[in-house]
Amino acid sequence: MSTLVIKDLHVSIDDKEILKGLNLTINTNEVHAIMGPNGTGKSTLASAIMGHPKYEVTQGTIEIDGENVLEMEVDERAKAGLFLAMQYPSEISGVTNADFIRSAINARREEGNEISLMKFIRELDKTMDFLEMDQDMAQRYLNEGFSGGEKKRNEILQLMMIKPTFAILDEIDSGLDIDALKVVAKGINEMRGEGFGCIAITHYQRLLNYITPDHVHVMMQGKVVKSGGPELAQRLEAEGYDWIKQELGIED
Ligand code: ADP
Ligand code: MG
Ligand code: MG
Protein backbone atom coordinates (compact mmCIF):
# COMPACT_ATOMS: atom_id res chain seq x y z
CA MET A 1 0.00 0.00 0.00
CA SER A 2 1.10 3.57 -0.74
CA THR A 3 -0.08 6.76 0.90
CA LEU A 4 -0.13 10.33 -0.36
CA VAL A 5 -0.25 12.76 2.55
CA ILE A 6 -0.87 16.48 2.15
CA LYS A 7 -0.53 18.53 5.33
CA ASP A 8 -1.28 22.18 5.96
CA LEU A 9 -0.65 23.06 2.32
CA HIS A 10 -0.44 26.75 1.47
CA VAL A 11 -0.01 27.71 -2.18
CA SER A 12 0.28 31.14 -3.78
CA ILE A 13 0.05 32.31 -7.37
CA ASP A 14 1.69 35.66 -8.06
CA ASP A 15 1.82 36.29 -4.29
CA LYS A 16 -1.92 35.69 -3.91
CA GLU A 17 -2.63 32.87 -1.47
CA ILE A 18 -5.02 30.33 -3.04
CA LEU A 19 -4.60 27.25 -0.84
CA LYS A 20 -4.76 28.11 2.83
CA GLY A 21 -3.90 25.07 4.89
CA LEU A 22 -5.26 22.07 3.03
CA ASN A 23 -5.11 18.57 4.52
CA LEU A 24 -5.78 15.37 2.61
CA THR A 25 -4.62 11.75 2.91
CA ILE A 26 -5.15 9.19 0.17
CA ASN A 27 -4.24 5.51 0.14
CA THR A 28 -3.98 3.24 -2.83
CA ASN A 29 -7.16 1.24 -3.38
CA GLU A 30 -9.19 4.40 -2.66
CA VAL A 31 -11.03 6.87 -4.87
CA HIS A 32 -11.54 10.33 -3.41
CA ALA A 33 -13.85 12.87 -4.99
CA ILE A 34 -13.14 16.56 -4.45
CA MET A 35 -16.00 18.94 -5.02
CA GLY A 36 -16.38 22.64 -4.39
CA PRO A 37 -17.46 25.93 -5.93
CA ASN A 38 -15.55 27.47 -8.84
CA GLY A 39 -12.39 29.35 -7.98
CA THR A 40 -11.89 27.58 -4.67
CA GLY A 41 -8.49 26.16 -5.59
CA LYS A 42 -9.19 22.62 -6.84
CA SER A 43 -7.08 22.93 -9.98
CA THR A 44 -4.45 24.79 -7.97
CA LEU A 45 -4.19 21.75 -5.69
CA ALA A 46 -3.71 19.48 -8.72
CA SER A 47 -1.01 21.74 -10.20
CA ALA A 48 0.80 22.10 -6.88
CA ILE A 49 0.94 18.33 -6.40
CA MET A 50 2.46 17.96 -9.88
CA GLY A 51 4.95 20.79 -9.32
CA HIS A 52 3.77 23.43 -11.79
CA PRO A 53 6.33 26.25 -11.45
CA LYS A 54 3.72 29.01 -11.25
CA TYR A 55 2.31 27.59 -8.03
CA GLU A 56 4.47 28.45 -5.05
CA VAL A 57 4.18 26.27 -1.99
CA THR A 58 4.77 28.62 0.95
CA GLN A 59 3.95 26.20 3.77
CA GLY A 60 3.07 22.59 4.43
CA THR A 61 4.14 19.20 3.11
CA ILE A 62 3.29 16.65 0.41
CA GLU A 63 4.69 13.16 0.90
CA ILE A 64 4.36 9.74 -0.73
CA ASP A 65 5.24 7.00 1.73
CA GLY A 66 7.34 9.50 3.64
CA GLU A 67 9.21 10.79 0.57
CA ASN A 68 9.16 14.56 0.20
CA VAL A 69 7.35 15.31 -3.08
CA LEU A 70 8.00 19.05 -2.84
CA GLU A 71 11.72 18.47 -3.32
CA MET A 72 11.14 16.55 -6.55
CA GLU A 73 11.27 17.99 -10.07
CA VAL A 74 8.21 17.47 -12.25
CA ASP A 75 9.69 14.42 -14.00
CA GLU A 76 10.69 12.93 -10.65
CA ARG A 77 7.10 13.29 -9.44
CA ALA A 78 5.89 11.32 -12.45
CA LYS A 79 8.56 8.74 -11.73
CA ALA A 80 7.38 8.57 -8.13
CA GLY A 81 4.00 7.51 -9.51
CA LEU A 82 2.00 10.75 -9.77
CA PHE A 83 -0.19 11.47 -12.78
CA LEU A 84 -2.36 14.48 -13.60
CA ALA A 85 -5.18 14.56 -16.12
CA MET A 86 -5.52 18.29 -16.62
CA GLN A 87 -8.78 20.20 -16.79
CA TYR A 88 -7.59 21.60 -20.13
CA PRO A 89 -5.14 19.11 -21.74
CA SER A 90 -2.62 20.93 -23.92
CA GLU A 91 -1.82 20.23 -27.56
CA ILE A 92 1.70 19.15 -28.45
CA SER A 93 2.38 19.46 -32.14
CA GLY A 94 4.97 17.12 -33.65
CA VAL A 95 4.65 14.47 -30.93
CA THR A 96 2.32 11.58 -31.67
CA ASN A 97 0.07 10.29 -28.99
CA ALA A 98 1.72 6.85 -29.12
CA ASP A 99 5.25 8.28 -28.82
CA PHE A 100 4.21 10.47 -25.92
CA ILE A 101 2.73 7.53 -24.01
CA ARG A 102 5.71 5.26 -24.73
CA SER A 103 8.17 7.90 -23.50
CA ALA A 104 6.11 8.40 -20.36
CA ILE A 105 6.09 4.65 -19.66
CA ASN A 106 9.83 4.37 -20.25
CA ALA A 107 10.59 7.42 -18.11
CA ARG A 108 9.31 5.44 -15.14
CA ARG A 109 11.48 2.39 -15.95
CA GLU A 110 15.14 1.76 -15.37
CA GLU A 111 17.48 2.18 -18.32
CA GLY A 112 17.79 -1.11 -20.22
CA ASN A 113 14.34 -2.18 -19.01
CA GLU A 114 12.25 -0.18 -21.50
CA ILE A 115 8.97 -1.63 -22.74
CA SER A 116 9.43 -3.48 -26.03
CA LEU A 117 7.79 -1.94 -29.07
CA MET A 118 5.77 -5.13 -29.67
CA LYS A 119 4.46 -5.27 -26.14
CA PHE A 120 3.72 -1.54 -26.18
CA ILE A 121 1.73 -1.75 -29.41
CA ARG A 122 -0.19 -4.78 -28.18
CA GLU A 123 -1.15 -3.02 -24.94
CA LEU A 124 -1.99 0.21 -26.71
CA ASP A 125 -4.28 -1.59 -29.18
CA LYS A 126 -6.01 -3.48 -26.42
CA THR A 127 -6.51 -0.39 -24.27
CA MET A 128 -7.79 1.71 -27.18
CA ASP A 129 -10.30 -1.03 -27.94
CA PHE A 130 -11.36 -1.08 -24.32
CA LEU A 131 -11.89 2.70 -24.44
CA GLU A 132 -13.67 2.46 -27.80
CA MET A 133 -11.15 4.77 -29.45
CA ASP A 134 -10.30 4.97 -33.14
CA GLN A 135 -6.91 3.34 -33.77
CA ASP A 136 -5.79 6.34 -35.81
CA MET A 137 -5.81 8.45 -32.63
CA ALA A 138 -2.51 6.76 -31.74
CA GLN A 139 -0.64 8.36 -34.63
CA ARG A 140 -2.17 11.81 -34.34
CA TYR A 141 -0.27 14.63 -32.67
CA LEU A 142 -1.07 14.84 -28.99
CA ASN A 143 -4.45 16.49 -28.46
CA GLU A 144 -4.13 18.42 -31.73
CA GLY A 145 -7.60 18.83 -33.16
CA PHE A 146 -9.02 16.36 -30.62
CA SER A 147 -12.57 17.18 -29.58
CA GLY A 148 -13.22 17.88 -25.90
CA GLY A 149 -14.48 14.33 -25.43
CA GLU A 150 -11.56 12.79 -27.31
CA LYS A 151 -9.08 14.68 -25.12
CA LYS A 152 -10.67 13.35 -21.95
CA ARG A 153 -10.83 9.80 -23.29
CA ASN A 154 -7.20 10.16 -24.30
CA GLU A 155 -6.25 11.19 -20.76
CA ILE A 156 -7.74 7.90 -19.58
CA LEU A 157 -5.77 6.04 -22.27
CA GLN A 158 -2.59 7.62 -20.89
CA LEU A 159 -3.65 6.75 -17.36
CA MET A 160 -4.28 3.10 -18.20
CA MET A 161 -1.02 2.77 -20.13
CA ILE A 162 1.25 4.64 -17.68
CA LYS A 163 -0.33 2.98 -14.62
CA PRO A 164 0.55 5.61 -12.03
CA THR A 165 0.23 4.98 -8.29
CA PHE A 166 -1.80 8.14 -7.74
CA ALA A 167 -3.87 9.92 -10.36
CA ILE A 168 -5.45 13.35 -10.08
CA LEU A 169 -8.28 13.77 -12.57
CA ASP A 170 -9.33 17.40 -12.89
CA GLU A 171 -12.89 17.63 -14.21
CA ILE A 172 -12.39 14.57 -16.39
CA ASP A 173 -16.18 14.54 -16.83
CA SER A 174 -16.63 18.08 -18.11
CA GLY A 175 -17.89 18.33 -21.65
CA LEU A 176 -18.56 14.60 -22.02
CA ASP A 177 -21.73 13.15 -23.44
CA ILE A 178 -23.19 10.21 -21.57
CA ASP A 179 -21.53 7.52 -23.72
CA ALA A 180 -18.08 9.10 -23.34
CA LEU A 181 -18.69 9.55 -19.62
CA LYS A 182 -19.43 5.84 -19.27
CA VAL A 183 -16.25 4.93 -21.14
CA VAL A 184 -14.14 7.26 -18.99
CA ALA A 185 -15.69 5.80 -15.84
CA LYS A 186 -15.09 2.26 -17.13
CA GLY A 187 -11.39 3.08 -17.54
CA ILE A 188 -11.07 4.52 -14.04
CA ASN A 189 -12.92 1.58 -12.52
CA GLU A 190 -10.61 -0.79 -14.38
CA MET A 191 -7.63 0.94 -12.71
CA ARG A 192 -9.08 0.65 -9.21
CA GLY A 193 -7.19 -1.74 -7.01
CA GLU A 194 -4.32 -2.24 -4.64
CA GLY A 195 -1.70 -0.35 -6.60
CA PHE A 196 -3.81 2.66 -7.49
CA GLY A 197 -5.34 5.64 -5.71
CA CYS A 198 -7.29 8.45 -7.30
CA ILE A 199 -8.45 12.00 -6.68
CA ALA A 200 -11.35 12.89 -8.96
CA ILE A 201 -12.16 16.59 -8.99
CA THR A 202 -15.71 17.07 -10.21
CA HIS A 203 -18.69 19.38 -10.05
CA TYR A 204 -21.24 16.71 -10.69
CA GLN A 205 -22.77 13.68 -9.10
CA ARG A 206 -23.22 12.18 -12.57
CA LEU A 207 -19.59 11.00 -12.73
CA LEU A 208 -19.96 9.56 -9.24
CA ASN A 209 -22.99 7.56 -10.35
CA TYR A 210 -20.52 5.48 -12.36
CA ILE A 211 -17.49 5.71 -10.07
CA THR A 212 -18.60 5.31 -6.49
CA PRO A 213 -16.04 7.23 -4.44
CA ASP A 214 -14.78 5.89 -1.13
CA HIS A 215 -14.48 9.42 0.24
CA VAL A 216 -15.91 12.79 -0.77
CA HIS A 217 -14.31 16.10 0.22
CA VAL A 218 -15.63 19.60 -0.13
CA MET A 219 -13.16 22.39 -0.78
CA MET A 220 -13.97 26.00 -0.02
CA GLN A 221 -11.71 29.01 0.12
CA GLY A 222 -8.56 26.98 -0.28
CA LYS A 223 -9.19 24.23 2.26
CA VAL A 224 -10.98 20.93 2.67
CA VAL A 225 -13.88 22.00 4.87
CA LYS A 226 -15.93 18.82 4.98
CA SER A 227 -15.39 15.12 4.28
CA GLY A 228 -17.76 12.21 4.09
CA GLY A 229 -18.88 9.29 1.98
CA PRO A 230 -20.81 9.13 -1.31
CA GLU A 231 -23.92 10.49 0.42
CA LEU A 232 -22.17 13.85 0.80
CA ALA A 233 -21.92 14.23 -2.98
CA GLN A 234 -25.59 13.34 -3.32
CA ARG A 235 -26.57 15.99 -0.81
CA LEU A 236 -24.44 18.61 -2.63
CA GLU A 237 -26.15 17.71 -5.90
CA ALA A 238 -29.57 18.13 -4.30
CA GLU A 239 -28.94 21.16 -2.10
CA GLY A 240 -25.83 22.98 -3.35
CA TYR A 241 -23.21 24.43 -1.00
CA ASP A 242 -25.20 26.91 1.10
CA TRP A 243 -25.88 24.48 3.93
CA ILE A 244 -22.16 23.84 4.37
CA LYS A 245 -21.43 27.56 4.40
CA GLN A 246 -24.10 28.03 7.06
CA GLU A 247 -22.90 25.06 9.08
CA LEU A 248 -19.34 26.36 9.08
CA GLY A 249 -20.15 30.08 9.24
CA ILE A 250 -18.37 30.78 5.93
CA GLU A 251 -19.20 34.10 4.30
CA ASP A 252 -19.15 34.46 0.49
P1 ADP B 1 -11.06 25.78 -9.17
O1 ADP B 1 -10.32 24.73 -9.91
O2 ADP B 1 -11.54 25.34 -7.82
O3 ADP B 1 -12.18 26.37 -9.97
P2 ADP B 1 -8.60 27.26 -9.44
O4 ADP B 1 -7.58 26.51 -8.67
O5 ADP B 1 -8.60 27.14 -10.92
O6 ADP B 1 -10.04 26.95 -8.84
O7 ADP B 1 -8.45 28.80 -9.11
C1 ADP B 1 -8.37 29.30 -7.77
C2 ADP B 1 -8.04 30.77 -7.79
O8 ADP B 1 -6.72 30.96 -8.29
C3 ADP B 1 -8.95 31.60 -8.69
O9 ADP B 1 -9.18 32.83 -8.05
C4 ADP B 1 -8.13 31.76 -9.94
O10 ADP B 1 -8.46 32.97 -10.60
C5 ADP B 1 -6.71 31.81 -9.41
N1 ADP B 1 -5.76 31.24 -10.37
C6 ADP B 1 -5.69 29.94 -10.76
N2 ADP B 1 -4.69 29.75 -11.64
C7 ADP B 1 -4.12 30.96 -11.85
C8 ADP B 1 -3.04 31.43 -12.65
N3 ADP B 1 -2.33 30.60 -13.43
N4 ADP B 1 -2.73 32.75 -12.57
C9 ADP B 1 -3.44 33.58 -11.77
N5 ADP B 1 -4.46 33.21 -11.01
C10 ADP B 1 -4.82 31.92 -11.02
MG1 MG C 1 -13.11 25.65 -12.18
MG1 MG D 1 -10.52 23.89 -11.79
Image (cartoon, helix red, strand yellow):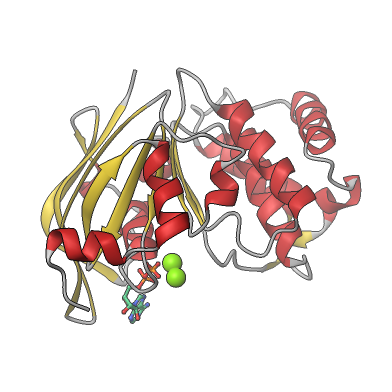
Is residue 38 in view?
Answer: yes
| Image mark count | 0
What residue sits 26% from the left and 43% below the top?
227
Q: Quadrant of ligand 2?
A: bottom left
Identify the image quadrant of residue 173. Answer: bottom right
Q: Position of residue 116 (x, y in %)?
A: 72, 25
Q: Nearer the viewer, residue 14 or 182?
A: 182
Q: Position of residue 56 (x, y in %)?
A: 21, 67
> Is 127 placed left or right of 206 in the picture?
right
> Is 188 placed left or right of 77 in the picture?
right
Identify the image quadrant of residue 66. Answer: top left
- Position of the N terminus by quadrant: top left
- Position of the C terminus by quadrant: bottom left
What residue sits 53% from the left and 58% below the top?
171
Q: Position of residue 119 (x, y in %)?
A: 76, 23
Q: Nearer the viewer, residue 212 or 132?
A: 212
